[in-house]
Amino acid sequence: MKNFRNFCVIAHIDHGKSTLSDRLLEITKTVSMRDMKAQTLDNMDIERERGITIKSHAIQLYYTRPNGEVFTLNLIDTPGHVDFSYEVSRSIAACEGALLLVDATQGIQAQTISNLYLAIEHNLEIIPVLNKIDMPNAMVEEVTDQIIDLVGIPKSDIILASGKTGEGVDKILEAIVEFIPPPKGDPAAPLQALIFDSVFNSFRGVIAYYRIFNGTIKKGEKVRFVNTGNEYHADEVGVLQMSQVPKNELSAGNVGYIITGIKESKEIKVGDTITVAAHPCKEAIKGFEDVKPMVFAGLYPIQNEDFEDLRDSLEKLQLNDASLVYEPETSIALGFGFRCGFLGMLHLEIIQERLSREFNQEVITTVPNVSYRAYTKRTGLMVINTPNDLPDPTMVDYIEEPYIHAQVITKPEYIGAIMTLALEKRGNLTHQHYLTTTRVELSFDLPLAEIVFDFYDRLKSISRGYASFDYAPKDYRKSDLVKLDILLNGEPVDALSSLVHREKADAFGRKICAKLKELIPKQQFVIAIQAAIGAKVIARETISAMRKDVTAKCYGGDITRKRKLLEKQKEGKKKMRQIGNVDVPQKTFFEVLKLD
Amino acid sequence: MFALVAGIYIHIPFCRKACYYCNFHFSTSFQIREEMIQAMLKEISLQAAYLKNQSIETIYFGGGTPSALPTENLQQLLEEVKTNFKVIGDAEVTLEANPDDITVESLKQWKEIGINRLSIGIQAFQDELLTNWNRSHSSAQGLSAIALAQEAGFGNITADLIYGGPGLTDEDWLSNIQRLVDSDIPHISSYALTVEPNTVLAHQIKKGTSSEPDDELANHQYEILQAKLKEAGFIQYEVSNFAKPGMESKHNKNYWTGAHYLGIGPSAHSFDGVSRQWNIANNVKYIKALESGEIPFEKEELTKTQQFNELVMTGLRTSMGIDAQRIAILGESYTSYLKSEIQYHMDQGKIVINAEGNYSLKPAYYFFADGIASDLFFVEAAPETDLS
């Protein structure tokens, strides 16, 4: 066990984690240059394109020190986005050390800091690495100061590196074996293994990744997942190299996989503890949470007849993304679809994109909303995942909405604008802290609902890109909410209903009407767009009738040109959904929220 | 079944001046006129078999500005057509003419060579508008052109008017229609001013020196047009064409009813029932190709679905409606597709089944014919297999 090291990499998106990981694999000869696709660890298409890691993965490397001593390094990759903070925390809990990877051209970002604090909380040994030092715009001195301020270590302990050129990678490997403590644990004790991730394989079923804290996991034994209480047969156990390498057993300190024939990934909960059914451990590893979706939206097929196909696609997606939940719902405007729960807005976008890319399934997404708690006078607590579930206001005692704790790191000159934005978003500043003279950390409590609507884009634009953002769910608080309905030619469009804070309803209603006017094309008649609370109309816009397409002179028998033009027009119409008599482009339901 | 009538369109690709809104094919240089005529004569003989010996009932000189050609050129072209095709005795022979080309002498010559219908490009009776559009004639020339033509014995006259353009008030518009009605011509064509790409007008709008045509205004003026001409005894047989009973343009009607036609000259379009083709829109390249005995054209064979879409599109533009028989020939699946798709518009009262048993658009909705046509189009790739 003394020659094992388990570590993760804490980094912001684009700070070079994947490139550095590739370099580690290459130098330790875990993967040959020839086999290497750029950024080996990110193996979903979307991840590679967006340059982020959505789901974590793990890999085992063998490192031979200059003195010939061989070490087994388990690199546990962490997801790189705020929506997946719980999964990050489980990956961190599986390690003894972390590389703190900071882009020398960018400096420290909010998400890095919150993950760093998480790592420090878990007593991880931190190895700071300043990456991309080969870039001409690297700010080595300044970012070094930021790191010293944050971690409080001597300058000499910061490794200067470049994932691209490979510079400093040998020092990183040495630091890993030198400074990160070997794992502790008793191989003879009852099994305690922490599940930090799972993946779905269409041939093998769900494969769980775990870190063993105590005991030994053996092929063929009956294992129990402590929190779900389910028991399975360990069909195969092994370690993760470039492919899975089966073993007869794995012991305390190691990281590996288990295949049990589980078909649905929702049976495996990240953070759960695996033990042996015959000699179970006394208690589960701390920190398990059954992660609940935070953001809900309706997903509808564009053609009603594709409903069953959409169901199949969602089922398959859920196989490898247990955090996706869905149940059928019906919309008057959109027909049959599903109300889906997501960890956050990025997660929602990823699901949309995967549906399109992997299943060729274009969907209409309705206005997303957070999960509210309504306390009714008669029946007590009701969880509200769609505006249409909100009981009649007279029946409701009070409503609570989820709050988050948000951290923003920015340059001092943008503090004012960011505070104004946060206030507008009903947030309150809880903490302000200068990391260096040019970098300040702002902490807010903020209703989650407010970041669903146009928060990221605005933060980015008011700070000219110099603000990074991270959040974690905090608590539920009482709130004065109303249901805002949108009507097209007098017909309510349930898919566009939203729950908004009463004080903001007017402004929001006006904006949404104006945005709809932009998004809905002119048609053969006048279209009235209204926003209403109950029977009270609070905003209105009118789209005038389209009057143009017919009477252009058709040149001497040129039927072809006109036919092609109209065929194109028809293609466009097919991408629309008819609501009442109004054709609404599918993108409307999502784009409508991108308010300025 | 539908009568097999065929027509020949002859495109004269020259104009003295370029109207700022026009994107049809023409050149303002007449230098290669002789070569052009020779090339066109050659094309006529090369295409002698195109219409498969059908009787030619209409010949149409369009452009461009055909009236700007010396009459002997027109005559050469007509003679060549008659040599190579079976032209019926009372064929409709139309010449598009600009008012400034219409004189007692030219009228006499045109009549002599067999022109029996004139299409006069009046466009407006406001000098300011004519100047803005870079037309080559004045309002007074427009009026006198009609009178001269009538005096010369041309009874079958049509005139064009443009509406919906900036600067044309409703009063102007009413008076323009009234002047044509008063002149007692039996046919009027009228088009909304549209901004076509690569025109001076498009450029002016982009620069902000001209304002964009107003859709609402165009629609309003279209309604005025329909009402005024109905009152004056014209029948609207196509979205943009109005005629006294029996005076419809046979040639233009053919475009919308599926008749075959041969187009001669650069950029001219031809249709033989199953394919469409169009000549290159470049005078020099056209001439060069024909000098070496080649007709420079592009061609598309129409799939059943494309034929269906064309029948819908053209049918909705005419009072005759979508030809149910022709749809039926394409196959039962097309008939039932159309029936199910059109129901919505029938429920809305926009489309009715007319006396011929065809779906036809009510005149009040002609302005939306294109939008409704595209609603009814068939563009899905997948069901194509069981439909064709």
Image (tube, rainbow, N blue to C red):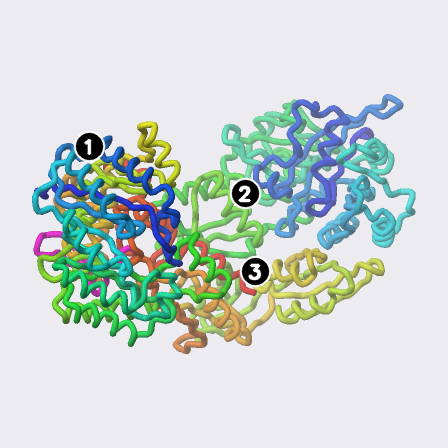
Same chain letter for marks 1 and 2: no
Q: Residue at x 71, y 58 (%)?
A: A467
Q: Secondary structure at mark 1?
A: loop
Q: Amino acid at mark 1?
A: Ala
Whichever of labels 3 and 2 marks the residue nearer the N terminus, that label is 2
Cα separation, mark 3 vs mark 1, equals 69 Å
* Quadrant holding the C terminus of chain A: bottom right
Q: Secondary structure at mark 3?
A: helix
Nearest the eye: A208 or A454: A454
Same chain letter for marks 3 and 1: no
Callout count: 3
Q: Chain of mark 1?
A: B
Q: Residue at x 46, y 70 (%)?
A: A483
What is the quadrant of residue B160 in the picture? bottom left
Question: Which residue corresponds to mark 1?
Answer: B48
Q: Is residue B16 left or right of residue B270?
A: right
Q: Residue A195: horizontal and vertical position, in percent?
A: 64, 39
Question: Which mark is in front, 3 or 2?
Answer: 3
Read off the magenta span: B350-370
Would you say residue A491 sits in the magenta stretch? no
Question: Which residue corresponds to mark 3?
Answer: A452
Nearest the eye: B300 or A553: A553
Question: Which residue corresponds to mark 2?
Answer: A321
Q: Residue A250: horizontal and vertical position, in percent?
A: 69, 28
Q: Is residue A517 left or right of residue B176?
A: right
Q: Is residue A514 left or right of residue B38?
A: right
